[in-house]
Image (cartoon, helix red, strand yellow):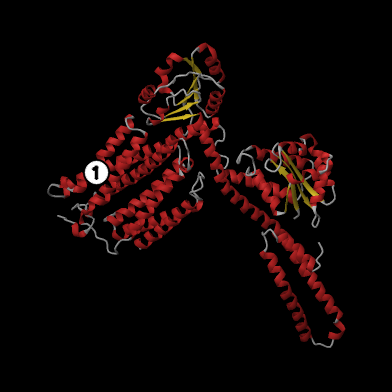
Amino acid sequence: MEITFAWVAAAFYALGVAYAYSEARRSRPHLPRKALGALGVGLLAHAISIASLAIVTRRFPVADIHTALSFFAFLLIIAFFLAYWRYRAPSLGLFMLPLVLLVTVISALRPDRTFESPAFRSGWLWAHVAASILGYAGFSITFAAAVMYLLQERQLKSRRPRGFYYRLPPLETCERIYYGSLLFGFPFLSAGLIMGFVDASREWHGAWEFDPKILASVLTWIVYLVLFSAYLSGIWRGRRAAYVAIFAFAILMVTFLGVSFVSGQHGYFPKLGNIP
Amino acid sequence: MNLFLLGMNHRTAPIEVRERMNIAEAHLSAALTDLTRRDGILEGLILSTCNRVEVSASAEEGVDAEPVVRAFLADHHHCDLSAYERYFYAYRQHDVIAHLFRVASSLDSMIVGEPQILGQVKRAYEQARSAGALNGELHEVLLHTFFVAKRVRRETLVGASAVSVSYAAVELARKIFGDLKGKVIYVIGAGKMSELAAKHLLSSGARAVFVSHQVHGRAESLAALFKGSAIHYEDLFSTLHQADIVISSTASSEFVIRREQAERALAARKHRPVFFIDIGVPRNIDPSINTLDNAFLYDIDDLGQVVEANKKQREREAVWAEAIVQEEVQKMMRRIASRDLVPTIVALERQFEGIRESELQRFHGRLSSLNQEQMRAVDALTRGMLNKILHGPITELKNAVGAPEHGALVQLIRKIFGVAE
């Protein structure tokens, strides 16, 4: 059932994206109501999909790469709605929604019988996973805001305004979204990391510190720490901060997805699993 | 529905002709009374602005309003209209509705999206209303016109981007800072343009600091006028980091703000953005400052270019606005048509039923030999024939609802079947 509803969610997201883009040439200050409606229905279906998985398996509904992506997309669209209402920037949707759709579709392409890591028997692990993915969702918005900032900044610097100038929000709004999402994402990423350490030190045997995913996560966290403090101190602002945010997001995605293929404990896949 | 509009605007007629045809506000009431008293004319509206003169009227069905309206204009101006023939445009029926919608939505204006026209249409409407010249379909169309204009404003940005240099500066500032409340503007030197830009910025909630060589001169009087403060030129660079927006228009032949000074100010304000507006000729601010991160420099030519781009943007938005107008014309036509439709269908059916009944009456004697069942069959037969005959025209009428030719079709069908008005 959870896969059916994931597909239903994907279909409605696709509809929402189509509606949003159909009016994208228009610089109207709102997303079309039809688009928001379709996205809302998609969100509902997505929630049912995740909830039904949780009820059937009687655990936190993230256990492998597909369910992790599904949860990520779910948080991403919630984050989109919150940011949309808070900052009234429909253009944010044009950058984020295709990502939501893509991630949802990938997550729905899952095998019927999901691999379940015994590690999830640990009572704490779900909190580590949830906090990490919440952090990822926050930083995805940071990424979108950084891209928007760069596009708008280029328009303003060129002194020859074209399409993006009229559609994108003011630089200051981009910065507020950027900073707000950074402020949201960073504590979750940190908490996720710390809970992961605690869990690994208790459950894993051997040199868990050298697991590729843990190393990558620490690196990502450091990049975001630098970005966060540089922003606060005013050393990096505007364009430079935006570039670093895009770079940081690339590392984050590699950590989230790429490293899972080589990491033993974070393999998500049974054949790579090396569970003690 | 029988609507007609005769008019000329800035595109079809030169200013001398528009002046000649202009109907002064003082004479409007009398003119409207004159117009609506003429044969066949039910309602009238006169829109007379510096860019257009338009007379709209609704007339009785079957009356051609054109010669009446022409005669009215000729009489009013005591002239022969044939000399001005080529300057006029004339619209009928749904084209009148579309034109009124376009005019009120500022799609027919010299500067697309300019806001005054809606007010002018509203004033024309009020004058016509108080002169008792609006009480039917034209009135209804006008009420919907205001709705359409509002919808266009709400759903498109046709009037949103600035088409004057000083407003363009304000808009750019908004694109950088979002809200301008509490932002500090440094106005260096005085001039008409910088004063104007400062005034617009201040009305958005910014605060001004005036800088000049003699504090006790122009800067202080400007500061008093705009509720700002004044500083001496020597203090400019020690406080420049406070400025979010810098407007410069001095007659200096050297750069007033050089690159290093901008760099220092940016560092001191932790690289929060600064918007430099250089209105001076020769330029007051080193153009290379635009290459600094978080500094945005526009000179007078750049602002002009933004205005040009904004005009193009308005034209692009106008495409969406036109689509809204078309949609609303369809809606209006459907509404009017469906109202015309029901009485026509009822009249048609009544007409045919009358014929059937009188024919049955006529043959009553010859049919008296039939028994009750046969009589019922004759009744059903004749009724069925009528329904079959009427099915075609009624379906056509219903299908044409909302189409431009609907009114003509209603007239035609009424005429063919001899249905009275």
Instruction: Give the answer, above or below, for where A191 lies relative to B282.
Output: below
Crowding at dot 1, Cα within 10 Å, few <14 / some 14-19 / many 20+, comes out as many
Percent position of residue A270, x then y: 21, 59
| Chain letter belonging to callout 1 | A
Circle 1 SS class: helix
Residue at image point 62% right, 38% down: B115
Is residue A38 shown to the viewer in this render?
no
Q: Tell whether B90 sits left or right of B153.
A: right
Residue A97 visible in the picture: yes
Looking at the picture, how far across and down is residue A242, in whole percent?
Answer: 35, 38
Q: Is residue B156 left or right of residue A54?
A: right
On screen, residue B60 above or below B210: below
Q: Which amino acid does the dot numbered 1 rest on?
A: Leu
Seen in the image, is A269 located left or right of residue A86? left
Q: Is residue A241 above or below residue B382?
A: above
The outermost residue toward the left is A206
- From the top left corner, tell me how far across and down residue A135 is, in percent: 31, 44
Residue drawn at 70 percent across, 47 percent down = B142
Q: Which residue is mark 1?
A: A193
In depth, the one of B370 and A179 nearer the eye is: A179
Give the quadrant of the C terminus of chain B. bottom right
Identified at 72% across, 54% down, the residue is B93
For the N terminus of chain B, the image quarter is bottom right
Question: Foreground: B51 or A142?
Answer: B51
The x and y percentages for residue A85 are: 45, 43
Q: How many marks?
A: 1
